[in-house]
Image: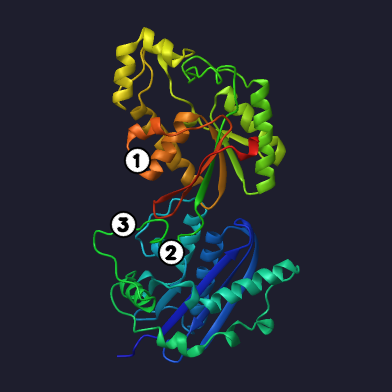
């Protein structure tokens, strides 16, 4: 029986800005000799890292197909795709769902190039993907000069040790999509122990090397209103105050800080006036539009709206004690419990993370939604809501990764107001 032809595809993509000027690179290798059989690279204009990585994968698979004189046939070829993008490898292997609308058509296009039974996927450390990485950077460099990548000008193949490529590639084995063996080899190469069956990937010291760019929420609490200095309950149950003069100044300083950092790409806001005014100040400074998200509104404090803590204690003492003791207890008069707010905010978070994967979003909202997002990211209990300080016009930040983990980057920063 004729053995199927075997190929290795290494692919990569990059974006200088994410999104920004982007390009991809792909190389097809003979696993027996390490010989380069084909190279592909292209500058693709403004795109995200993930889009560029998928485009690199598609180019590599198409290059394999072009090497088959009779096209893909039953019994061959066998292609091992090696990439340092955890996102692409896990999604194409079928272990992660593809939620982002930009990724779905790209993944479908990649799946159509060759039969699914012919392709397996393996994550590799970035240092083992230097050939494709150099091709992607050559493509981006060409784009910066207003040109496209040309094979004759490439030095990526010359700069890559061939022996390391061949030595790293064992025979293809296991069912299609099974990258367990490849992951084990990668850990061994890095002198890392294999994770136990109960281990959960964590963002930070134990993180996977490449989960793609996270969706980053820059959480901006609205500026002061007339109720803020008096510490009155101000939710969504009837009170909808505008910003005070102090609050408008705070919003402008927040806008200046966002402009100086230059990282905000989208703006979403609670529907309440104080947030819309704060978001509007930033949007005008950055030249962006504001998208309103109902799920970002403040808690409905019911009969407590407009009252101070002391006034609520005096009038509704028993209800206040119950509220302080349990996240399931609601304010007097049909307000929202913290448990209800948590469910609403979590659903909104999931929707925004899916919509803005890989992007930095300014989220203009209120005390409870911001504290809830931080609490959920930390896995902290509901009572932690009472143990966080959150000043007017303060900035916090949480990053959400493709594997479902989150990382709190900042909490209650007011340095821009000084």
Mark 2 or 1: the one toward you: 1
Question: Which element carries disc 2, helix, strand or loop?
Answer: helix
Q: Residue at x 34, y 60 (%)?
A: 95
Query: What residue does disc 3 label?
Result: 200
Q: Is residue 47 visible?
A: yes
Query: What residue does disc 2 label?
Result: 86
Instruction: Quote the CA–CA distance across marks 3 and 2.
Output: 15 Å
Compared to residue 276, the image places residue 314 above or below, namely above
Q: Earlier in the sequence, mark 3 or mark 2?
A: 2
- Residue 257, quarter of the rendered image: top right
Q: Residue at x 56, y 63 (%)?
A: 52
* Image x and y of residue 165, in percent: 46, 85
Query: What residue does disc 1 label?
Result: 380
Compared to residue 411, the image places residue 84 above or below, namely below
Instruction: Quote the CA–CA distance across marks 1 and 3.
Output: 17 Å
Mark 1 or 3: the one toward you: 1
How dense is the environment of label 1, judged by Cα within 10 Å: few (below 14), some, or many (20 and up)? few
Compared to residue 44, the image places residue 319 above or below, namely above
Mark number displayed over residue 109:
none
Q: In the rendered view, how is the structure colored?
A: rainbow
In the drawing, does residue 327 fall left or right of residue 392?
A: left
Q: Earlier in the sequence, mark 2 or mark 1?
A: 2
Question: Which element carries disc 3, helix, strand or loop?
Answer: loop
Instruction: Quote the CA–CA distance across marks 2 and 1.
Output: 28 Å
In the drawing, does residue 390 fall left or right of residue 245?
A: left
Question: Which element carries disc 1, helix, strand or loop?
Answer: loop
Q: Residue at x 42, y 13 (%)?
A: 310
């Amino acid at each position: 029986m004729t053995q199927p032809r075997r190929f290795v595809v290494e692919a990569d993509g990059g974006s200088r800005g994410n999104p920004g000027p982007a390009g991809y690179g792909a190389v097809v290798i003979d696993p027996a000799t390490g010989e380069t059989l084909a190279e592909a690279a292209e500058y693709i204009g403004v795109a995200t890292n993930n889009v560029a990585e998928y485009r690199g994968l598609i180019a590599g698979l198409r290059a394999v197909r072009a090497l088959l004189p009779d096209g893909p046939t039953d019994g061959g070829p066998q292609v091992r795709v090696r990439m340092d993008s955890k996102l692409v490898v896990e999604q194409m292997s079928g272990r992660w769902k593809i939620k982002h609308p930009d990724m779905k058509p790209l993944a479908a296009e990649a799946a159509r190039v060759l039969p699914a039974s012919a392709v397996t996927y393996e994550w590799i450390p970035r240092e083992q993907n230097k050939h494709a990485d150099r091709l992607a950077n050559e493509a981006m460099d060409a784009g910066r000069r207003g040109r496209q990548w040309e094979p004759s000008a490439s030095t990526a193949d010359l700069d890559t040790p061939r022996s390391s490529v061949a030595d790293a590639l064992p025979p293809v084995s296991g069912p299609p999509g099974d990258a367990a063996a490849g992951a084990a080899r990668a850990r061994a190469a890095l002198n890392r122990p294999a994770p136990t069956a109960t281990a959960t990937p964590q963002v930070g010291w134990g993180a996977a090397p490449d989960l793609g760019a996270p969706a980053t929420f820059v959480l901006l609490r609205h500026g002061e209103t007339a109720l803020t200095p008096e510490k009155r309950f101000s939710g969504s149950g009837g009170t909808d105050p505008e910003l005070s003069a102090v609050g408008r100044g705070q919003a402008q300083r927040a806008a200046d800080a966002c402009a100086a950092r230059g990282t905000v790409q989208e703006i979403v806001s609670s529907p309440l006036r104080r947030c819309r005014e704060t978001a509007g100040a930033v949007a005008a400074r950055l030249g962006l539009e504001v998208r309103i998200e109902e799920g970002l509104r403040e808690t409905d404090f019911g009969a407590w709206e407009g009252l101070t803590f002391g006034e609520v204690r005096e009038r509704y003492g028993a209800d206040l004690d119950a509220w302080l003791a349990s996240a399931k207890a609601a304010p007097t008069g049909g307000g929202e419990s913290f448990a209800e707010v948590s469910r609403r905010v979590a659903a909104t978070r999931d929707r925004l993370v899916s919509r803005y994967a890989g992007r930095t979003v300014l989220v203009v909202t209120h005390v409870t939604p911001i504290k809830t997002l931080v609490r959920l990211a930390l896995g902290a209990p509901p009572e932690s809501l009472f143990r966080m300080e959150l000043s007017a016009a303060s900035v916090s930040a949480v990053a959400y990764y493709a594997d479902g983990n989150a990382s709190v980057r900042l909490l209650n920063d007011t340095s821009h107001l000084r």
